[in-house]
Image (spheres, helix red, strand yellow):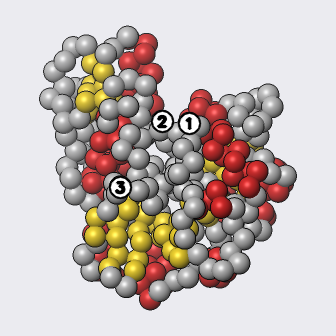
């Protein structure tokens, strides 16, 4: 837990060095990635990982994603099969996380894996995150930098709104380009399971893996983002709405009048990038107007639309 206000770091060599130094001291730092901002801590430190759970109010059975700079670094802590190697060669660095068997002597805190024999790993593409990884020199655990179950942050301001005073610093990298968390896959000899829809659509993946086996809400949480209620505003959310209720905040997709729009042109890439910032804005507007609910128009369920609908379904789930 940080004492006092959270420091906002500039995207400069000094800011990068400060972020790496705080991580080395066991502190938590909000870091930008191409997907969403991550709440970063030393993945080898039990204390740092415990602080992540404390800051987020995160259930202990929900594992953390480990961020690494290179495939060589991955090989030191996890075992990759041929499918995993093909996926890594094609999509890393980028918005793909793979759940892989742990290697003996991996050195990670057991809090990272939530007691599982596997670890979720990603090579991020964001240049600031990569610079911090290089400066820090070790694996970084980084779930989304928001209170657990709430809307994921795509700007430094979102991080501060949820975690100011709970973490040491935020490195301001501007808005996240992808705006959705990473897709999570578990490649195995019996096929590749899709554990979370995300910023890499299955249409891009299946030419390498064959048909994915969807396993996004299993009985036991195997990867981040699988809780049925997640990404939730404080205001109740209704999906597939015709946007006619005068007592609700209306969020459209495509042309039409509404309080807010995910994409006025009906572009799924734009909608994905704007999803969490729009949910933040809709929640604030609902509180200001004392609106009873947030109503969201239907989103096409293909490509990135599947990941958007997955996040919205979890945001609208009973809690």
Q: Which residue is mark 3?
A: 219
Q: Earlier in the sequence, mark 2 or mark 3?
A: 2
Tag 1: Cα neighbours inside 10 Å, few (<14), some, or many (≥20)? many
| In the image, residue 185 above or below residue 286 | below
Residue 223 x/y as whole percent? 46, 59
Cα gap from disc 2 to disc 1, whole angstroms: 6 Å
Identify the residue at horizontal 18%, vertical 31% (top origin).
241
Residue 222 x/y as whole percent? 45, 60
Identify the residue at horizontal 43%, vertical 13% (top origin).
288
Q: Quadrant of residue 197?
A: bottom left
Element marked by disc 3: loop
Q: Quadrant of residue 196?
A: bottom left
**Residue 248 placement, left or right of 13:** left
Q: Is label 2 in contact with label 1 (beta carbons under 8 Å)?
A: yes
Quadrant containing the C terminus in the rendered view:
top left
Q: Which residue is mark 2?
A: 150
Identify the residue at horizontal 42%, vertical 41% (top origin).
230
Q: Nearer the viewer, residue 243 or 48?
A: 48
């Amino acid at each position: 837990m940080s004492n006092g206000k959270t420091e906002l770091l500039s995207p400069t060599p000094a800011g990068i060095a400060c972020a790496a130094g705080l991580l080395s001291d066991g502190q938590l730092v909000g870091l930008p990635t191409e997907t969403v901002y991550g709440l970063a801590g030393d993945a080898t430190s039990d204390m740092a990982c415990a602080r992540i759970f404390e800051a987020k109010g995160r259930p202990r059975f929900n594992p953390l994603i480990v961020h690494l700079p290179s495939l060589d670094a991955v090989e030191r802590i996890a075992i990759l099969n041929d499918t995993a190697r093909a996926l890594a060669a094609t999509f890393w660095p980028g918005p793909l996380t793979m759940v892989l068997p742990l290697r003996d002597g991996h050195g990670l805190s057991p809090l990272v894996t939530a007691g599982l024999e596997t670890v979720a790993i990603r090579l991020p593409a964001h240049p600031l995150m990569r610079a911090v990884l290089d400066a820090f020199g070790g694996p970084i655990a980084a779930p989304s930098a928001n209170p657990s179950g709430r809307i994921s942050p795509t700007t430094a301001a979102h991080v501060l709104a949820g975690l100011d005073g709970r973490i040491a610093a935020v490195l301001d990298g501007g808005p996240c380009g992808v705006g959705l968390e990473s897709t999570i896959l578990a490649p195995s000899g019996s096929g590749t399971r899709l554990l979370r829809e995300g910023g890499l659509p299955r249409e891009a993946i299946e030419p390498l893996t064959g048909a994915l086996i969807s396993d996004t809400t299993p009985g036991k949480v195997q990867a981040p983002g699988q809780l049925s209620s997640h990404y939730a505003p404080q205001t109740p959310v209704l999906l597939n709405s015709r946007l006619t209720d005068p007592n609700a905040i209306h969020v459209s997709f495509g042309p039409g009048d509404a309080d807010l729009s995910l994409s006025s042109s009906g572009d799924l890439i734009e909608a994905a990038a704007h999803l969490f910032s729009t949910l933040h804005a809709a929640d604030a507007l609902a509180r200001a107007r004392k609106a009873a609910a947030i109503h969201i128009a239907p989103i096409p369920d293909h490509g990135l639309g599947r990941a958007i609908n997955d996040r919205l379904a979890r945001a609208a789930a009973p809690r």
